[in-house]
Amino acid sequence: MSLDSLVQQNKPELSMLEQTLGYRFTDLRLLQRALVHTSYAFENSFSGEDNETLEFLGDAVLDLVVGAALIHRFPAMREGELTRLRAALVNETHLATMARNVDLGRFLSLGKGEDASNGRNKSSILSCAYEAVVGAIFEDGGYATVRDFVLRFFVPAFDERRDDLLIADAKSRLQETLQEQFNEAPSYRLDLEEGPSHQRIFTVSVIFRESILGSGSASSKKEAEQRAAAATLAEYDQMIARL
């Protein structure tokens, strides 16, 4: 079977996917190729017609488009923070989530063994296929078109991922900030532990120079400390004025 015959066979499904993606291809073979996993290509002698090259291209396109969008969305963010945020948006886990949101696994061409082993729901396969679709849109419609496509799906996740990263990295960033400003590090105090043993809630405060700078609550002490640090950073300007 050739790629052209696969396109003819799958035209109704490809059209359905185009509607979900919000983009109609000029060359439908590009979309079909983006959906051909190496296992299917091997079993059907598709020489050089799997989605790996488009995946490579899509990976580069995502880095560029998402990176440029983050700079404009968060102009005051440092390079290291931008890098971590972009990585959180284009990593395997998030890309697989994006793929599941458009039911991409349903449209994949997989080898028999991969299909039988739940390949349509594997994050590694879904994330690569999503990158390949991005690469296919770039090849078919150019940069402006793929930029609009990527931003339509990714921008809603910008603030959520940023908040997740800020909380996860809050303790180290707060320590760096206070060390730089005052050459001292904060400490953390457990103020409250409540709830049944299987649903404990911990409340922690950030202590600096005998003052409480912020508090946070969570189901673990470590996360409560991160949330307390994040709350402190959110009020950092007011905190500096009090010290």
Image (cartoon, helix red, strand yellow):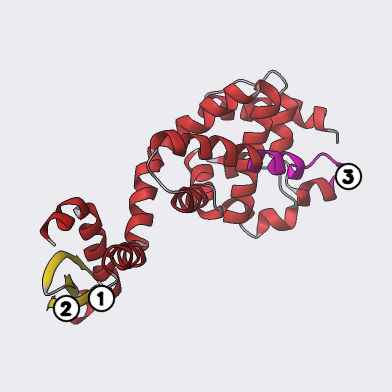
Q: Quadrant of residue 177?
A: bottom left
Q: Residue at x 58, y 42 (%)?
A: 63
> Quick check: marks 2 and 1 in contact, CB under 8 Å?
yes
Q: Residue at x 45, y 50 (%)?
A: 85
The amino acid at mark 1 is Lys
- Give percent across and percent down for residue 132: 67, 39
Q: Which residues are magenta?
A: 43-59
Q: Depth check: 197 or 58 in front? A: 58
> Tag 1 or tag 2, which sits nearer the N-term?
2
Residue position for label 1 = 221
The amino acid at mark 3 is Ser
Q: Secondary structure at mark 2?
A: strand
Q: CA distance from mark 3 to mark 2?
A: 63 Å
Q: Secondary structure at mark 3?
A: loop
Q: CA distance from mark 1 to mark 3?
A: 55 Å
Mark nearest the camera among 1 and 3 is 1
Q: CA distance from mark 2 to mark 1?
A: 8 Å
Q: Depth check: 197 or 6 in front? A: 197
Residue position for label 2 = 190
Residue position for label 3 = 45
Q: Examine the rendering and report whether any part of residue 10 can be seen.
A: no
Left or right of 97? Residue 216 is left
